[in-house]
Structure formats: structure tokens, C-alpha cells
Image (spheres, grey):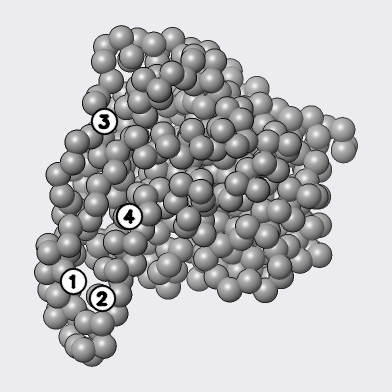
Amino acid sequence: MTVRGALNTVPRMRLISVLAALAFFATPAFAQVAPPTAAELARLDRIVRIAPIIDGHNDLPWAIRDDHGNELANVDLNSDTRLLTPPLHTDIPRLRAGRVGGQFWSVYVPASLQGAAATQAVREQIALTRAIIAAYPETFEFAGSAADITRIHRAGRIASMFGMEGGEAINGSLETLREFREAGVLYMTLTHSTTIAWVDSATAAPQHGGLSPFGEEVIREMNRIGMLVDLSHVSADAMRDVLTITRAPVIFSHSSAFAVTPHPRNVPDDVLQLVRRNRGVVMVNFFPAFTSTEVWHWGAERLGEQARLQALNPGNPEAVTTGVAAWVAANPRPQIDAGVIADHIEHIARIAGRGAVGLGADYDGVPFLPVGMEGVDGYAVLFAELMRRGWNDRDLAGLAGGNVLRALREAERVAARSR
């Protein structure tokens, strides 16, 4: 979940609906990456038999809760969910077309929820995600370990894991952290769009210079219980603090390269060098506002125009909506395609090594995506682009899911030694 980094007081799907109403889809034409050829698809099929495509972050559970009444009956994942109102990025036919073999489903709750309310909301999100998995047993199966992921993939199903987004939900309690691990949570994103009592966010004012002393305890306990530390959304200083403390590989479940796009959500080169030594994995985000400086700046300018119109039209939201739509029509959003995402992957690979890259698309958590990658069927075009750039099958298998599987196995070994 990402778009609330700058607008964390606005509920996600209401924000996405507003952005759509403001013609967020309006874009100038450009020459996009060619779709994969039959030979490239056949090669990808061979690669995913070696290692499944494992995506680090998909917000479908919150989209169902926030947009579709928290009722599974309202969302048939066997059908084309682009036809829903509002539409979704995820359904089973597109997951199959995308060759997805493993998915970390985000059990996200908004940063505005704190304390016991956040804890309870995560419990509810875990229950909802378990219900999604149970509703489609021919497709999904819960995975609580690296061995489970491999076994489920070999059986032809999609391994389904929980990733918890936002450490506020442990409510300052290591016991609650352990409860979530026992409930099946394999990673925890330490914070989201706000700085909390023990760790700084990338998109809020710092309070701790990274981690507080309790934050250090949290990292040690996550190592002990075999829960991956997820450094997406945390400040660069918090990244450095964690990488100094942790004994297990870390992940970034949905982050990209700061040197390519200097958004505060992205990973600086000095941190990537630490990730190389840590044997961690950066799972690259697809959201154009985080992966294209041009799109990021366009979004900031659009928000500036919206603020200007709100100041000029207090109490008149219709005038603001109309005015922003006119601004977007005159200043269309730039487009990106798989080439930009490949640029981030290649930069991370140059600094941290090809064993340190993965995929964390952020589907159903963002309002728009690269052209040709608008849903969970969009991975093939990215792999085809990297094939054209000379990536070999071994490195592509690592990117697909082999690297994050290796990191999870190593974290499991650290936990086993601790016990």
C-alpha cells in the first residue's frame, strides 16, 4: 500500500476514486516496450518451473474490505475483476496468465488506526485473507514457510502468504508480534506512512534517527521468531539501523532505487551496498509515482493545483474537482512502461547484486500502473524486456522468486539456531 505516503489522511480507495474522477488516466502517447513474443513466453514458462514468480505485496484484501463491503460474495475472483466498480488489478485468470506462483497478500490497515484498534484490524485482515484462500482451494493454498511455497508451487497452486504492513499494530508489545507470527505472518513492514513510537517513516518527520531502543528489540525478536523484516516505507536511517542489527536477511517488499528516482520511499545506494552484505532482497515496486521522477513531479504539481483551487473555492468541492480535471487535461500524466521498472531492477542488481532483486508490484494498492502492466497478468512484459537486455535464466529465476525464497530460508535458519 503506497499512495497514502503523501496523502495519509485520505482513505485509499476514496483517494483512488477521486483521482480517477480527475482524469488520472489522461496520458500522452509514447512508444512502449513491445509485448513478449511466443519464444519469450516459452522461455518464461521454463524459468517459472525453476522458481515461481513471487510478488511481495498485493493489497487485494484491503481493496475488498474498503471498496466491496468486506464481502467475498461481492468479488468473484474467477471472473474479470476489471468489470467491477471500482475495478481490481487481481483475479485468478490474470494471476494464471501472469504465471504467479506465490503471493504475499498484504494484511494492511490504515496508518490512521493506532493501538488496539490497529491490532484488531490486522486480525480481521488475516481472517479475511484466510477466507479468500479458502474460497478458492483449487487455486490458493496458505504457505507458512519456504518449503510450503515450493511444495504448493509444484502442485500447481498459488502459495499464499501474509505480509503485515505497519508495526503500529503490535501496539508496543513483543507478545503481540509473536501472536501475529503464530497466525502465519511471514513479514512485517515496520511502519507505513507515519513515524510511530519506535521507528521513523520515509514520508513523515523523523523522531528517532531511525530506530528507537524498543525498535531494536523488535528487530531481534523478529529474527528469533523467523519473521522477515520489511524495510519498505521506513526512513533511510531506519534502514541503516536495521541492517546493522539484524542477523537475518531483510526484504523490501515493494521499493525501488533512489538513484533512479529520488523518492524518499526508495532505497539509496549506500543501503543497497548493505543489502548486498546482508543477502537481503529489494522487491521492486511498479507504481509510476515511485519509479519515474517525471511522474512523481507531475503528481506533486497536480496536488499543488488542487491545494490552490481549494484555497480559492472553500466549501465548493465541485469547483475543485472541475478545476483539477481541467488542469490534468492540459497537463496529461506522463506514461511509463516496463522499461522504467527494468531500469530500477538493473540498478539494484548493479549495486546489490542480481541475487538481491525481486518483484513487489503493489497491485490493488495504487491508482495506476505502467502501460502493459496494469494487472497481475503484467509480469511477462517485464521479463521479456530483461531477456532483451541480456539477463540469463538463472538470474531471471532469482528475480522471479528464487531470491526471496533464499532469504526466507536463511531467516528460518537464523530462527532455528535462536531456538
Q: Tell me residue 367's x, y (percent).
A: 31, 53
Q: Residue 294 bears which disc, if any?
A: 4
Horizontal side of residue 3 vs 196, given as left or right: left
Residue drawn at the location 73% of the way across and 38% of the way down: 278
Mark 2 or mark 3, which has the lower sequence index? 3
Relative to 360, is 108 above or below? Answer: below
**First along the sequence among labels 4 and 2:** 4
Residue under label 1, please give it: 324
Q: Earlier in the sequence, mark 1 or mark 3?
A: 3
Label 3 CA crowd tier, 10 Å (few <14, some 14–19, many 20+): some
Is 2 placed above or below 248 here? below
Residue at image coords 25%, 39%: 371
Question: CB of mark 2 within 8 Å of CB of mark 1?
Answer: yes
Could you tell me the amino acid type at mark 4?
Answer: Glu
Q: Point out the image quarter for the C terminus.
A: top right
Circles 3, 4 touching at the beta carbon (< 8 Å): no
Mark 1 vs mark 3, CA separation in Å = 30 Å
